[in-house]
Amino acid sequence: MAKATQPLTVDGPVGELDTLFLQAEGECRGVAVICHPNPLQGGTNTNKVVQTAAKALSQLGYACYCPNLRGVGASQGTHDHGAGEVDDVLAVVERARADHGDLPLVLAGFSFGGFVAARTRQRIDAEKLLLIGVAVGKYREPTPEVPAGTLVIHGEQDEVVPLADVLEWARPQNLPVTVFPGVGHFFHGRLVELANFIRQRF
């Protein structure tokens, strides 16, 4: 985790949400909420991909909130397979705007978190959407279409969410997908490149 990461408790719809906050470097230009991978497979807000994205966005001037969604870590409630988690994210956005005003919003997520971020974008406007290793076709509800300009990043050799599934989802949307060659789901050994790419594209 970045040295400036601070613990924070956010009031969620089913109880407290255990959240990590990373302040913006320099002048704050926006807020970002970054969602973690599937908790049933050990995913939490300390995941390295989540923290890599948060650090990159904070360096670009975004105040970053990384919640443990319901039932994860010290967060109250029960895991809801991506349904109730959308309400959790909306609560974190509300807290972020209470803290920082009505600044531009980035919704981001890794794997399950990308699925949650995409579903949250159906309920609220966001300046940008960042989906890393998005878990297409893994949950009860389909991964929704996303706005043009969404940044989708995926590993060529993703062993959890096949690249072919993501391309099939993206194709009818004419949505570009950035592929990291030779990379698996967790971007092992390529996190520095991932951070650099996020900074370049935002």
Image (cartoon, rainbow, N blue to C red):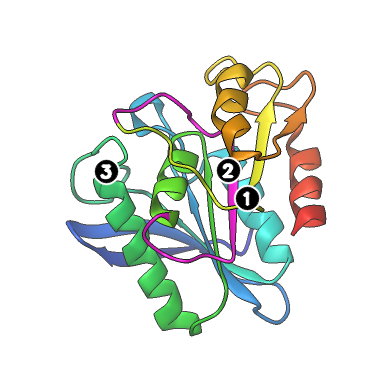
Mark with earlier residue (3, 2): 3
Secondary element type, mark 1: loop
Q: Is residue 66 left or right of residue 48?
A: left
Q: Position of residue 189 (x, y in %)?
A: 76, 28
Report the amino acid beneath label 1.
Thr
Lower sequence index among marks 1 and 3: 3
Instruction: Identify the residue under disc 2.
Output: 131
Disc 2 + disc 1, Cβ < 8 Å: yes
Q: What is the span of residues highlighted in magenta in the rendered image?
A: 122-140
Provide residue 63's location: percent of width, then percent of height: 58, 70
List x then y, in percent, for residue 51. 59, 48
- Number of numbered discs on residues: 3
Magenta stretch: dominant SS? loop
Residue at the spot of label 3: 83
- Label 2 element class: strand
Judging by the rendered image, the residue that carries numbered circle 1 is 150
* Residue 47 visible from this viewpoint: yes
Q: Which amino acid does label 2 sit on?
A: Leu
Disc 3 residue type (three-letter): Ala
Instruction: Measure how far apart labels 2 and 1 are at the Cα level.
Output: 8 Å
Task: Of the two numbered discs 2 and 1 on the same chain, state the one appearing first in sequence.
Answer: 2
Q: How far apart are marks 3 and 2 (CA)?
A: 18 Å
Q: Foreground residue, 152 or 88?
A: 152
* Residue 144 image-quadrant placement: top left
Quarter of the image that includes the C terminus: bottom right
